[in-house]
Image (cartoon, grey):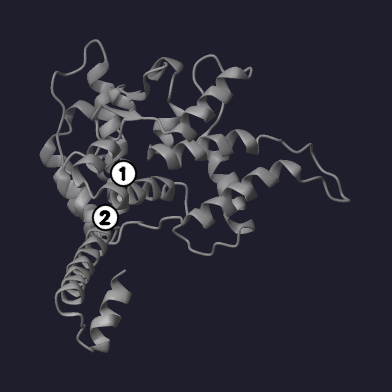
């Protein structure tokens, strides 16, 4: 950004048109949409910080993020999830080799709790690390996570997520220990989380390069969509700004649902023929289609 806007450019002088020119320049330099979006996110945070100053401008430049084709969509199966989480847990059992070295930091169990919450809630890593105890409601009747600090949210859209039983159990366990007074994961950091995750994935022998921490968010969303078929619910749960964003990312789940719908129709016809006529058409392709779809 410094090379494009200049090292002495005042942030307040950058307009929406300037941002559009910057986006075009980034694309012309063959940068992927995902790379451009991460740089735009950085620029957006600077704009928001400027606006929050006592003498900051009332309005800031607006821009749209680029559509990311082929965005990461890797999701964990339940078996893979168990393997990775077990590998994380095992990291605290490692002992120094014959050459010793500095004392090993035994904190993998804390990051395991973080990963468990991520896959149960679909939160982004930064959102979970920024949680405060006041954001959590854990009463006899309610178990909620309130994400309301706008500047900490990627889309700037506040939302409330219900806790699963597993998620609540993790939070209660963390609170019962001598945890950080600010929040459940306030003593953890992104860099260490990524290091522990990478080691655990390698030890679990998952070779897919898209098996990064963010896949926990996709895993949660995929399971939720398969369980409910409700795209609007998934949009609100994840905090997407538009339903189109959710539909684009999880279109493959919608396709699976369509196949299951076709299989259900075929099964309905088979049941009718069996009960009404006592026979079924002898079409192997008919059977193969149903078996393949289900």
Q: In this view, does 210 lie above or below 110?
A: below
Element carrying mark 2:
loop
Q: Image quadrant of residue 140?
A: top left
Q: Which residue is drawn at 51% across and 39% down?
A: 116
Which corner quadrant holds the N terminus?
top left
Local SS, label 1 = helix
Q: Examine the image and state in which quarter residue 283 appears.
A: bottom left
Q: Is residue 137 visible?
A: yes
Picture residue at 47% right of the left edge, 35% below the top: 117
Q: Residue at coordinates 60% horizontally, 18% vertically from top-left?
A: 176
> Which residue is denoted by mark 1 in the rendering?
39
Left or right for 140, reference 153:
right
Q: Where is residue 66 in the image (x, y as percent from the top left)?
A: 20, 50
Instruction: Say the numbered circle drawn on residue 157.
Output: none
Of badges 1 and 2, nearer the viewer stands 2
Which of the image's four quarters has the C terminus?
A: bottom left
* Residue 38, placed above or below residue 30: above
Q: Which mark is residue 250?
A: 2
């Amino acid at each position: 950004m410094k090379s494009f806007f200049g090292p002495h450019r005042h942030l307040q002088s950058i307009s929406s048109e300037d941002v559009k020119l910057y986006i075009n320049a980034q694309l012309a330099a063959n940068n992927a949409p995902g790379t451009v979006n991460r740089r735009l996110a950085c620029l957006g945070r600077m704009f928001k910080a400027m606006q929050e100053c006592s003498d900051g401008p009332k309005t800031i430049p607006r821009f749209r993020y680029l559509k990311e084709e082929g965005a990461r969509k890797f999701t964990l199966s339940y078996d893979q999830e168990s393997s990775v989480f077990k590998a994380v847990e095992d990291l605290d059992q490692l002992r120094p080799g014959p050459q010793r070295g500095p004392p090993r930091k035994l904190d993998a169990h804390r990051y395991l709790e973080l990963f468990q919450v991520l896959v149960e809630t679909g939160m982004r890593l930064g959102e979970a690390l920024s949680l405060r105890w006041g954001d959590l409601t854990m009463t006899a009747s309610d178990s909620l996570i309130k994400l309301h600090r706008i500047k900490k949210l990627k889309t700037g859209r506040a939302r409330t997520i219900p806790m699963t039983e597993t998620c609540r159990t993790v939070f209660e366990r963390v609170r019962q220990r001598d945890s950080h007074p600010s929040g459940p994961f306030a003593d953890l950091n992104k860099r260490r989380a990524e290091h522990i995750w990478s080691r655990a994935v390698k030890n679990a022998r998952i070779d897919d390069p898209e098996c990064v921490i963010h896949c926990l968010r996709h895993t949660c969303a995929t399971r939720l969509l398969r369980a409910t078929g409700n795209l609007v619910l998934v949009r609100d749960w994840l905090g997407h700004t538009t339903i189109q964003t959710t539909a684009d990312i999880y279109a493959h789940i919608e396709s699976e649902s369509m196949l299951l719908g076709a299989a259900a129709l075929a099964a309905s016809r088979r049941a009718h023929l069996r009960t009404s006529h006592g026979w079924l058409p002898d079409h192997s392709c008919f059977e193969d289609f149903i078996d393949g779809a289900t």
